[in-house]
Amino acid sequence: MQVKNRLILLCNLLIISVVISPASAAAKKQGTLEECQYIKKRIEHFTELRRSGGSSGTMETWKKHRARYKDEYSDLRCTKWRNKLR
């Protein structure tokens, strides 16, 4: 009985480690200065396009593109490069 409990415990630990490790590895990815500069330029580009106006459909498309780049900026933790991105 004790061997069975240990086996169950080991299996549970293995499952937990497999589930947690990809998420933590993805969270640790950090963008390079070049990647972050490119993303920031794209965010600024779509911001300027929206400020210049357009049809509602076009504005929504630009808004979605801008939001995707902002998410990527956040995922890559580009705020580390904030001072160099000014």
Image: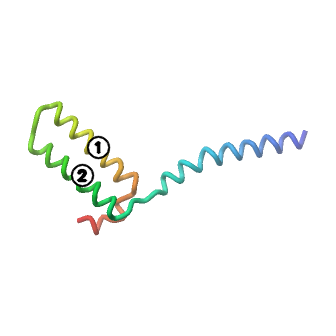
Q: Does 55 appear above or below 2?
A: above
The residue located at (29%, 43%) in the rendering is 67
Image quadrant in which you'd find residue 37: bottom left
Instruction: Assign the C terminus to one quadrant of the image.
Output: bottom left
Number of the front mark, 1 or 2? 2
| As drawn, 47 above or below 37 | above
Residue at the image position 46 percent from the left and 57 percent from the top: 29
Question: Which element type, helix, strand or loop, lies under badge 1?
Answer: helix
Question: Number of labelled discs?
Answer: 2
Which element type, helix, strand or loop, lies under badge 2? helix
Residue 44, position as x, y percentages in the image? 20, 53
Q: Amino acid at mark 2?
A: Arg
Nearest the viewer among 36 and 16 is 36
Using a 10 Å C-alpha cutoff, classify the residue at mark 1 as few (fewer than 14 neighbours), some (14 to 19) or many (20 or more).
some
In percent of width and height, residue 3 lies at: 88, 43
**48 relative position to 78: left or right:** left
Precedes in sequence: disc 1 or disc 2: 2
Where does the image place residue 82, in percent across and percent down from the top left?
Answer: 30, 64
Which quarter of the picture shows residue 35?
bottom left
Please state the horizontal and vertical placement of residue 52, each as a whole percent of the image.
Answer: 9, 44
Residue topped by disc 2: 42
Q: Residue at x 71, y 46 (%)?
A: 13
Q: Which residue is mark 1?
A: 67
Which residue appears farthest toward the right when viewing the image? 1
Q: Disc 1 versus disc 2: distance between alpha carbons?
A: 11 Å
At 32% across and 59% down in the image, what residue appears?
A: 36
Is residue 55 toward the left or the right of residue 82 in the image? left
Q: Amino acid at mark 1?
A: Ala
Position above or below: 16 against 40: above
